[in-house]
Amino acid sequence: MDIILLFVVFIIAILASWLLKKLHLPGLIGMLITGIVFGPYLLDFLHLWLINRSADFRLFALILILLRAGLSLDLTVIRKIRRSVFLVAAIPPLVEILTVTIIAPFIFPISILDAAIMGTVLSAVSPAIVVPRMIKRLNETNTIESSHSSSHKLPQLMIAVTTINGVVTVLLFSILLSFEGVGANLSTITRGVFLPLFIVTCGLLLQKTLPSIRDQITRITRWIWIPTEILLFVLVGATLDLQYVTQTGLIAVLIIVIAVCIRMIAVYISLTNDTFTRKEKVYCAIAYIPKATVQATIGGTALALGLPSGQIILVVAVLSILITAPIGAMLMENFPMK
């Protein structure tokens, strides 16, 4: 019976995704809504075993995404735009963290250190949203344009930056928690720092040493990602407790919107001295909007570790997924890259 219910939810998520795409909206919105409706906080149709294993499944999805990223990265192109990679990977997240650190203590009853932890949680871009769309762009440009064109370089930039961003976010998050006297456990650091670096390196080695196997793995991972994406965002939706969302209301939304807007400006400024066109810079700033995977993974860690501000951090992380994931995905799919 549980398997039948899961199958029904899966089919509904597919239909919801298809319907949203027909309306020229990202399919993941339908997946998120399906997860919210059938999750434990509303209809409670999803089996508890699946909910309890959602963190493990998100880890599997992250491994798959990072493997696809490693298989798609072109180190020759990355070397040519290494300055942009460094600036976009470093400046916008730090600006966003600093913005939240300054603003949050004036709005919530939290310390500056807790506000910095909140900013770190918010600063991660979702690889589950960005990487597949950038790989799709790469596949389109590979057939019609030179790898030296900016249309090819921009997806390479975003794949590299998104991967680096996730690693740095978890590392900063763990360091800040240590100042609180709790600290993230070794499993969090391993999953968030060492594992991503290892998976991306494996992908890079495969494409350099075994190009024929690389092509086969690329095709396999492309097909595996289709059901994985559906279940991933259904489970992300299932983690969204709407009761928590209503507790902070517009105040938390205001912090998220301000932080994202300032971050987008920082992305654009970071690319001012490069060869990208104005539209490409704007597209890069848009691609830095969506948050989902990392927030769903570490958003509740502060609460689990007993921080007094843990509940507020979790609520803001949940809201950031609800707001930025669909908006960022929609803008990425509809805004012209050039």
Image (cartoon, rainbow, N blue to C red):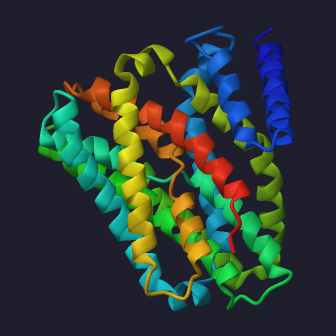
In the displayed structure image, the side of residue 263 where residue 39 appears, left or right:
right
Residue 286 in view in this figure:
yes
Q: Is residue 215 above or below residue 80?
A: above
Q: Residue at x 76, y 90 (%)?
A: 146
**Residue at the spot x=79%, y=36% of the render?**
20
When asked about the image quadrant of residue 16, the answer is: top right
Q: Is residue 148 left or right of residue 105?
A: right
Dividing the picture into quarters, in which one does residue 205 lie?
bottom right
Q: Residue at x 79, y 14 (%)?
A: 5
Which residue is nearer to you in this view: 211 or 72? Answer: 72
Instruction: Kindly tell me whether residue 186 is visible in this rendering.
Output: no
Question: Does 276 sit above or below residue 242?
Answer: below
Q: Residue furthest front?
A: 278
- Quarter occupied by residue 140: bottom right
Give the position of the N terminus as an image quadrant: top right
Q: Position of residue 13 (x, y in %)?
A: 78, 28
Q: Residue at x 37, y 57 (%)?
A: 262
Number of callouts in the render?
0
Reply above or below: 43 against 82.
Answer: above
Q: Position of residue 225 (x, y in %)?
A: 75, 49
Name the side, left or right, on which 179 lies relative to 35: left
Relative to 112, 187 lies left or right: right
> Which residue is nearer to you in this view: 105 or 210?
105
- Residue 60 at x, y = what percent? 61, 45
Q: Position of residue 277 (x, y in %)?
A: 59, 81
Q: Looking at the figure, which quarter contains the C terminus?
A: bottom right
